[in-house]
Image (spheres, rainbow, N blue to C red):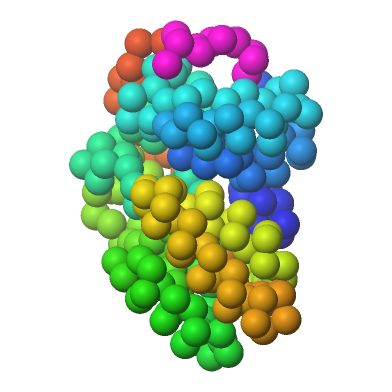
Amino acid sequence: MACIEDLLRFAGLPAPGGRALDAGAGTGRAAAALAARGVPVVALEPSPAMARVARRQLAAWPGAAVRQASFEGARLPAGGFRLVLAAQAWHWFEPATRWPRAAGLLEPGGTLALLWNVPDWRAHPLRPALDAAYRRRAPHLDARSPGGGGSHGIHDRPHRDPARRGWFGPMTRHTYRWRATYPTVAYLDLLRTWSDHRLLAPADRRRLLAAVAAVIDGAGGRLELAYTTQCYLARREPGGAPPAPAVDWVGSARAPARG
């Protein structure tokens, strides 16, 4: 993944003593990409179900650990990380505190990386049928932006957020384009990881996924999607680091967590 390679180069990782924090880690895909490249990583995920998946995803790397905790509430060492990463998650954090919180967890000159993957549905042949399935089964969700990627995501434009000032230096935006092909089952598994889909009542979710499956199966059982990844990078400003909460995690990434 070119995006991961570029952000690690920007952050100067992997390097001795350099740790990463994946905030709002979900199923742990971004954390696993860091761990696979030799970066010790702590993944924060408040959902018990997603944290279990992330632990399985990261089990192969001894330098990785998952904590079931929120970004705002986790007790972590001030200045303990060279990289704080939020992949598909920054828009869920408290706007009034997320910038100083990230700065407080970074070492001097440390990097904040914000990522969103946005699918391009504009001319997709299955767009009308999928929209119709969502209107029938989950009218408050959007087939073209599962997980809120379309309504939050790059439209947050964090490089233009005035709340960043004083905490981080200039923010650069990097764009990556790629494609993915999903068999029906794989796309349904992806939808199950999105927070808005997970929040549906189980029966409603089953009916929605069945409707989505019918659309994809009717088109040959495979869904091809074009994506744009937006990656925003910035370094912590000198002095831009308020006190972090009391520390209950120190040492290796395998140290036990207490909620």
Q: Give the range drawn in magenta.
A: 248-259
Q: Is residue 229 above or below residue 64?
A: below
Q: In this view, does 223 lie above or below 71?
A: below
Q: Is residue 34 above or below residue 77?
A: below
Where, quadrant-wise, is the C terminus in this rendering? top left
- 163 to the left or right of 80: left
Which one is nearer the viewer's eye here, 48 or 236? Answer: 48
Residue 142, position as x, y percentages in the image: 38, 70
Where, quadrant-wise, is the N terminus in this rendering? bottom right
Residue 2 on the magenta span: no
Which one is nearer the viewer's eye here, 57 or 2? Answer: 57
Among the 4 quarters of the image, the one containing residue 185: bottom right
Residue 150, position as x, y percentages in the image: 40, 69
Residue lying at 56% horizontally and 85% vertically, measured from the top left: 126
Residue 253 on the magenta span: yes
Residue 151, position as x, y percentages in the image: 34, 67
Residue lying at 46% horizontally and 64% vertically, measured from the top left: 208
- 78 to the left or right of 33: left
- 16 to the left or right of 163: right
Among the 4 quarters of the image, the one containing residue 136: bottom left
Residue 70, position as x, y percentages in the image: 38, 30
